Amino acid sequence: MIVVTGATGNVGRPLTQALAEAGEQVTAVSRHAAAVPAGVRHVAADLADPAGLAPVLDGAKALFLLLSGDLHALDARPTDLIDLAAAAGVRRVVLLSSQGVATRPLGPTRVMMRGLEDALRESGLEWAVLRPGGFASNALAWAESVRTRRTVASPFGDVGVPVVDPADIAEVAAACLLDARHAGGVFELTGPEVITPRQQAETVAAALGSPVRFHELTRDEAKAAMIRSVPPELADDTLDIIAAPNPAELRISPDVERVLGRAPIPFSGWVARNIAAFR
């Protein structure tokens, strides 16, 4: 049995589907009740309360670990989840980390995530670490304003990064959970092209067949919106990257293609699958 945390999110949902289609027994974990694929067991649990996850891990051979936003706070203890998995007899853990662990190692949330990566390496478990850059699905934050006002509001409109499709992250995660050949791997996951927020808005407009206006936010305006769902320190670390990506953050990684045998999905491909959200 494989346990998938964050199972109803942009990565967890396609990962759960892929594992179920591969014939695996899957337990999908999310904070709230949710629909899951046929044959998948769903458990509501909060990763901020590790004790509540203990019974979920009984009999699990592998765990996909995706931290909820509050576990990025400076006073969180996500390493408790690694201890819990080891105690439950889990053999393999695939951790969704962050590109910033390598490219911005001194950012407060990156220091915490590096500690979690180190704890996993030292746990005695089989492991793999996924380090994605920016997510294509972050554009869903614009869906309501595009539907109602045909407007995208974002900071740093002409600064781009190679955003990755969460479907690619999920497919790489499935490979790492199912195939021991990927054990001990650290995989940097990016899209195939650098694309700016303004270009993303133009891509959405082209898919809609309708003009979309771009409105550039200040950093303070963007942070105010972000901290409604993530800790302030995570918002700051993220904004530091998208304001001025360094050469490592602009690099197109070969790791998606190395694992999957195909090129990463471009932003336009993500938009084509999700255009209904913007109509």
Image: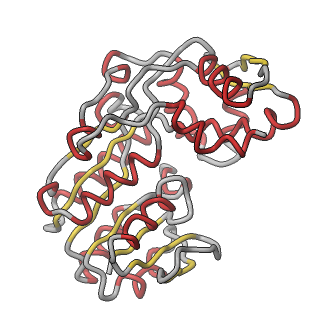
Residue 173 located left or right of residue 143: left
Q: Which colour scheme is used?
A: secondary structure
Name of the residue lying farthest toward the front: 209
Q: Where, by quadrant of the figure, is residue 206 drawn?
A: top right
Residue at screen point 66% across, 39% down: 226
Question: Which residue in the rendered view is the most extreme toward the top?
Answer: 158
Vertical placement of residue 56 versus 144, above or below: below
What residue do we see at 42% from left, 36% from top?
Answer: 265
Q: In which quarter of the image is the C terminus?
A: top right
Position of 126 with respect to 151 (left or right) is left
Q: Position of residue 103 (x, y in %)?
A: 32, 28
Q: Residue at x 49, y 69 (%)?
A: 47
Give the image location of residue 106, x and y in percent: 35, 31
Q: Which of 42 and 237 is in front in this view?
A: 42
- With respect to residue 267, does 53 lie above or below? below
- Residue 21 is situated, as x and y percent measured from the top left of the image, at 39, 70
Furthest-right residue in this view? 148
Q: In which quarter of the image is residue 98?
A: top left
Most foreground residue, 204 or 159: 204
Count the marks: how many?
Answer: 0
Residue 165 location (% of width, % of height): 46, 40
Report the side of 276 relative to 274 (left or right).
Answer: right
Quadrant of the drawing holding the N terminus: bottom left
Please, is residue 32 above or below residue 196 in the view? below
Name the quadrant containing residue 246. Answer: top left
